[in-house]
Image: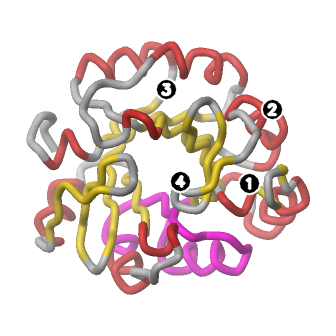
């Protein structure tokens, strides 16, 4: 399954390179809502909230009420996750809140699943150099994506793995990285980071992995 991505920053749809350099921006929201309405799932990320520089709450609500979305970015409490679901999100993506400092926070994962239902939770595995990064990819932990999956699997419905080194570069996604993760869980596994062509999506599908695509769609390399 192809999952188109909408990243929000400063009240606009944007595409960043490796989470830092802005490459594209759009404010023609209705066009993208129309183009993405055929998909069963859209990924909606509030980048300002993720890095702690503000938020796009009104826009998140607008998109989530028009499209079937899994919503992430700055969701670091049960209350914030509940608010995103109340705004129309089908599922919420949680990453940074799964860590207390450099260690996994099992208590938060369990508390969120109990309060919100594990079927509405997607746990993010954003990685640089084989280690999970948090807070908009600006803080690195000592925990690997595989360790995170093995520890927290019981409390979520899906895992979202982002290969930050290739994010936004349109240089392709490394399938060798995702294979051991696919083998480690029966939960839905979603991959993101540099996907640029249909054959990559097909390769991921063959492994049982769904694909989040942003830059390739916005640059017209893949149809939407």
In the rendered image, which residue does mark 3 sit on? Answer: 209
Q: Between disc 2 and disc 4, whose residue precedes?
A: 4
Q: Is residue 212 left or right of residue 16?
A: right
* Front label number (2 vs 3): 2
Identify the residue under disc 4: 137
Q: Is residue 24 above or below residue 149?
A: below
Of marks 2 and 3, which one's residue comes earlier in the chain?
Answer: 2
Eye-nearest disc, 4 or 1: 4
Q: CA distance from mark 4 to mark 3?
A: 22 Å
Q: Is residue 115 magenta?
A: no
Residue 122 visible, this orientation: no
Lateral position of residue 203 relative to residue 123, left or right = left
Number of other residues with Cα within 10 Å of mark 2, as a class: few under 14, some 14 to 19, many 20 or more:
few
Image depth: mark 2 or mark 4 in front: 4
Q: Residue at x 59, y 62 (%)?
A: 135
Q: Secondary structure at mark 3?
A: loop
Q: Which mark is residue 118?
A: 1
Dot 3, crowdedness within 10 Å: few (<14), some or many (≥20)? many
| Mark nearer the viewer, 4 or 3 | 4
Q: In the image, which residues are magenta?
A: 63-91
User: Foreground residue, 177 or 184?
Assistant: 177
Q: List x then y, in percent, for residue 76.
A: 67, 70
Q: Of tags 3 and 1, which is closer to the observer?
A: 3
The quarter in which the C terminus is drawn is top left
Q: Tell which circle, 4 or 3, labels the residue nearer the N-terminal end.
A: 4
- Cβ atoms at labels 2 and 3 below 8 Å apart: no
Horizontal and vertical percent for residue 73? 51, 66
N-terminal-most mark, 1 or 2: 1
Q: Secondary structure at mark 4?
A: loop
């Amino acid at each position: 399954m192809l999952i188109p991505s909408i990243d929000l920053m400063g009240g606009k749809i944007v595409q960043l390179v490796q989470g830092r350099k802005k490459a594209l921006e759009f404010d023609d929201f209705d066009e993208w809502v129309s183009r993405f309405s055929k998909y069963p799932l859209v990924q909606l990320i509030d980048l300002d909230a993720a890095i702690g520089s503000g938020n796009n709450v009104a826009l998140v609500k607008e998109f989530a009420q028009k499209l079937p979305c899994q919503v992430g970015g700055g969701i670091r409490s049960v209350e914030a996750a509940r608010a995103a679901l109340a705004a129309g999100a089908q599922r919420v993506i949680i990453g940074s809140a799964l860590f207390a400092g450099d260690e996994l926070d099992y208590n938060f994962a369990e508390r969120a699943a109990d309060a919100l239902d594990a079927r509405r939770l997607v746990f993010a595995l954003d990685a640089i150099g084989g280690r999970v990064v948090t807070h908009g990819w600006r803080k690195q932990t000592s925990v690997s994506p595989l360790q995170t999956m093995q520890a927290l699997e019981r409390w979520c419905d899906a895992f979202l793995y982002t290969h930050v080194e290739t994010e936004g570069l349109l240089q392709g996604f490394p399938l060798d990285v995702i294979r051991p993760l696919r083998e480690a869980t029966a939960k839905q596994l979603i991959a993101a980071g540099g996907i640029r062509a249909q054959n990559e999506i097909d390769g991921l599908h063959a492994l049982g992995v769904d694909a989040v695509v942003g830059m390739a769609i916005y640059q017209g390399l893949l149809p939407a």
